[in-house]
C-alpha cells in the first residue's frame, strides 16, 4: 500500500530520476577520506551545510515562542529558556551553532584558498561563497539584537554606529539600518525581518547556485 502510494506520487512528480541523478553521482577517490586521510578537508563545506540546516530547524522552533517587539522580546526569550520544553537546549544549539558555522566556513575557505580551488573555472563560485560569508555574518549581527537585553542593545549600538563613518552616505545608511535616529523598536523589527526572511531567502538562493556550480565544475584535484 505504502509503496504503491509512493509510486503513484512519483509518477506524477517524477522525483526519482532527479534523486537517482544526485544519489548515483560518484564521489571521486581523492575526495574520499577512506582512500586518502587528508581528504577530510573536503568535508568542511558539507559540515557547514549541515550546521545551516540545524540553524533553520532550531530557528523555526524558537520562532514559535519568540515575540519580536521591545515589550515582549526579552520576556519571551526568558520564557523559552525557563518554561518551554527543551527551550534552553534549542536556544543553546542555535547560539553555539552560529559560532560553529563561522569556524567551519572559515576552514572551508582556507581549504579552497590552500588548494587554489578559486581559480578558473571556479571564480564565480568563490564570489558566490564570499557573498554567503557576508550573509552568515549578517545572521550573527542581526540575531545578536533579538534577545533585547543590555548586551544585545549596546553591542548593536556599537556595530550600527560604525556605518556612520562611511563617507558621504554614512548618516543615511545609519537611518536605513537602525530604522530611525537611534536604536529602538524600529531597529528590532527590522533586524528580526532581515534575520528570518531576507537573509534566509538570499542564502537559500546562493546555496542553490553554489551547489549547481560544484556539480557543473566538479571538485578540484586530485593533488
Ligand atoms: C555558506 C556556507 C557554504 C557552504 C554550505 C558551502 C558548501 C560547499 C560544499 C559542500 C562544497 C563541496 C566541496 C567541499 O565541501 O569542500 C563547496 C565547494 C566550494 N566552495 Fe563552498 N560553501 C560555503 C561557503 C563558501 C565560501 C565562503 C567560499 C569562498 C569564499 C566558498 C567557495 C567554494 C568553492 C570555490 C568551491 C569549489 C571547490 C572545489 O572545486 O574544490 N564556499 N562548498
Image (tube, grey):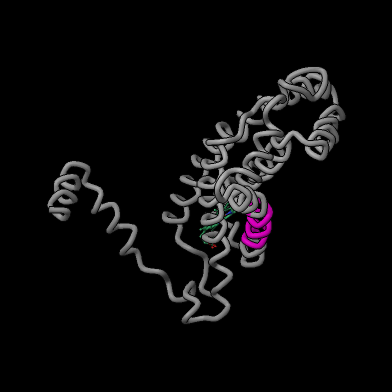
Q: Is residue 96 above or below residue 114?
A: above
Identify the main secondary structure in magenta: helix
The residue that appears at 34% across and 63% down in the rendered structure is 25
State which region is magenta: 97-109
Q: Is residue 198 above or below residue 219?
A: above
Quarter of image, ligand 1: bottom right
* Residue drawn at (64%, 47%) of the image: 133
The quarter holding residue 188 reads top right
Say which residue appears at 77% left-offset and 23% top-offset: 184
Tell me the residue at 30%/57% (across/down). Answer: 21
Residue 120 is at least partly visible in this image: no
| Residue 117 visible, this angle | yes
- As rendered, which of 134 and 159 lies closer to the eye? 159
| Percent coordinates x, y for residue 32 in the rendering | 47, 75
Is residue 22 depicted above or below 14 in this figure? below
In the rendered structure, the answer to whether residue 185 lies left or right of residue 170 reads left
| In the rendered image, the vertical position of residue 215 relative to residue 146, given as above or below | below
Amino acid at each position: 500500500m505504502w509503496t504503491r502510494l509512493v509510486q503513484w506520487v512519483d509518477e506524477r512528480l517524477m522525483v526519482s530520476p532527479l534523486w537517482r541523478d544526485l544519489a548515483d553521482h560518484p564521489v571521486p577517490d581523492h575526495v574520499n577520506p577512506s582512500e586518502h586521510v587528508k581528504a577530510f578537508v573536503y568535508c568542511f563545506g558539507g559540515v557547514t551545510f549541515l550546521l545551516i540546516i540545524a540553524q533553520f530547524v532550531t530557528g523555526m522552533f524558537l520562532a514559535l515562542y519568540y515575540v519580536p517587539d521591545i515589550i515582549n522580546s526579552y520576556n519571551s526569550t526568558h520564557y523559552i529558556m525557563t518554561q518551554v520544553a527543551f527551550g534552553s537546549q534549542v536556544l543553546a544549539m542555535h547560539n553555539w551553532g552560529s559560532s560553529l558555522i563561522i569556524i567551519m566556513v572559515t576552514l572551508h575557505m582556507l581549504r579552497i584558498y590552500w588548494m587554489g580551488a578559486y581559480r578558473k573555472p571556479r571564480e564565480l563560485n568563490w564570489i558566490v561563497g564570499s557573498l554567503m560569508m557576508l550573509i552568515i555574518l549578517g545572521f550573527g549581527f542581526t540575531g545578536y539584537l533579538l534577545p533585547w537585553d543590555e548586551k544585545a542593545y549596546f553591542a548593536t549600538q556599537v556595530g550600527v554606529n560604525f556605518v556612520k563613518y562611511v563617507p558621504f552616505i554614512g548618516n543615511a545608511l545609519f537611518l536605513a539600518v537602525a530604522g530611525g535616529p537611534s536604536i529602538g523598536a524600529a531597529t528590532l523589527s527590522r533586524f528580526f525581518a532581515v534575520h528570518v526572511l531576507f537573509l534566509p531567502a538570499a542564502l537559500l538562493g546562493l546555496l542553490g547556485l553554489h551547489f549547481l556550480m560544484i556539480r557543473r565544475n566538479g571538485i578540484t584535484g586530485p593533488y
